[in-house]
Image (tube, helix red, strand yellow):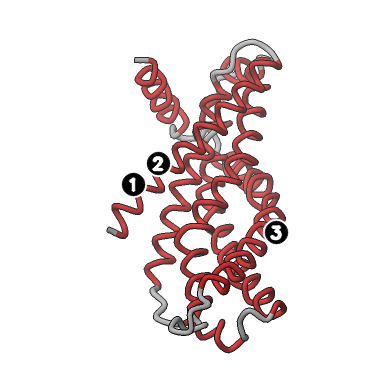
């Protein structure tokens, strides 16, 4: 029954968080601040991960496609579809859930145990809306951009390392990434990116908001936020794949 307790409390918190902001100017500024902190601050790690994932997929695919009956341009097809359908939206989101989720949970948790959240409530400010909603909006707006960035760099990384290592020629790789391309796959990936962004922002915020105790509990809330975000991202990855591709 504990799961129903947390589900109910989570949805009640989201209802509070999505209330009308007191001042739209402050709300807008908070969104831009969170976009910088959560989104732009994640560009570096997304770039590094995507380039090397694309390189690894290229080399592994070339090794697996040694059969002369399989055309070598299949390497480009494999890299393109792997990055767009799964690695960029799901794997990168999982990594960002660890980075962003721990940051959100620890920030809100620290404010909770230091009674800053109570101070906001005393001043008549909807603390859930002020602290949580800008993070959710920023994540949902910027995560699809990060995922597109990841797709591009993953395919580019595969091209660079594939050509440098000699496992595939530039012509075969470029032909492969354009062969029978389906634009809907990108739409599917962006839908997943938006859903995962909501999860990675709201779940850690929930755990941080209801932190009780001191620094030790803040750390536990941060851990719980990351773990449950990862589980929910994998769960919704399966659900959305079944709904949108099956």
Q: Position of residue 101 (x, y in %)?
A: 59, 36
Residue carrying label 3? 48
Q: Quadrant of residue 131?
A: top right
Residue carrying label 2? 235
Residue carrying label 1? 239
> Real-space Cα distance between discs 1 and 2?
6 Å
Mark 3 touching mark 2, by CB under 8 A? no
Nearest the viewer among 131 and 169 is 169
> Real-space Cα distance between discs 3 and 1?
28 Å
Question: Which residue is farthest front?
Answer: 67
Mark 1 touching mark 2, by CB under 8 A? yes
**Label number found at residue 123:** none
Nearest the viewer among 185 and 61 is 61
Residue drawn at x 57%, y 71% as measured from the top left: 63
Q: Residues within 10 Å of mark 1 (few under 14, many from 20)?
A: few
Q: The C terminus lies in which quarter of the figure?
A: bottom left
Q: Position of residue 84 (x, y in %)?
A: 48, 64
């Amino acid at each position: 029954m504990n799961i129903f307790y947390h589900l109910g409390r989570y949805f009640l918190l989201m209802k509070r968080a999505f209330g009308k902001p007191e001042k739209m100017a402050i709300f807008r500024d908070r969104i831009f601040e969170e976009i910088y902190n959560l989104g732009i601050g994640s560009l570096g790690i997304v770039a590094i991960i995507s380039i090397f994932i694309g390189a690894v997929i290229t080399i592994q695919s070339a090794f697996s496609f040694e059969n002369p009956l399989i055309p070598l341009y299949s390497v480009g097809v494999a890299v393109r579809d792997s990055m767009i359908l799964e690695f960029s939206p799901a794997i990168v989101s999982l990594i960002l859930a660890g980075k962003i989720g721990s940051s959100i949970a620890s920030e809100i948790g620290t404010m909770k145990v230091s009674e800053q959240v109570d101070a906001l409530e005393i001043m008549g400010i909807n603390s859930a809306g002020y602290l949580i909603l800008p993070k959710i909006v920023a994540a949902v707006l910027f995560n699809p951009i990060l995922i597109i960035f990841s797709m591009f760099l993953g395919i580019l990384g595969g091209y660079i390392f594939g050509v440098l290592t000699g496992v595939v020629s530039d012509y075969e790789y470029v032909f492969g990434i354009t062969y029978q391309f389906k634009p809907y796959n990108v739409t599917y990936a962006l839908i997943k990116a938006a859903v995962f962004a909501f999860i990675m922002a709201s779940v850690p915020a929930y755990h941080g908001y209801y932190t009780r105790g001191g620094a030790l509990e803040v750390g536990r809330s941060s851990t719980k936020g990351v773990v449950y975000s990862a589980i929910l991202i994998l769960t919704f990855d399966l659900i959305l794949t079944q709904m949108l591709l099956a």
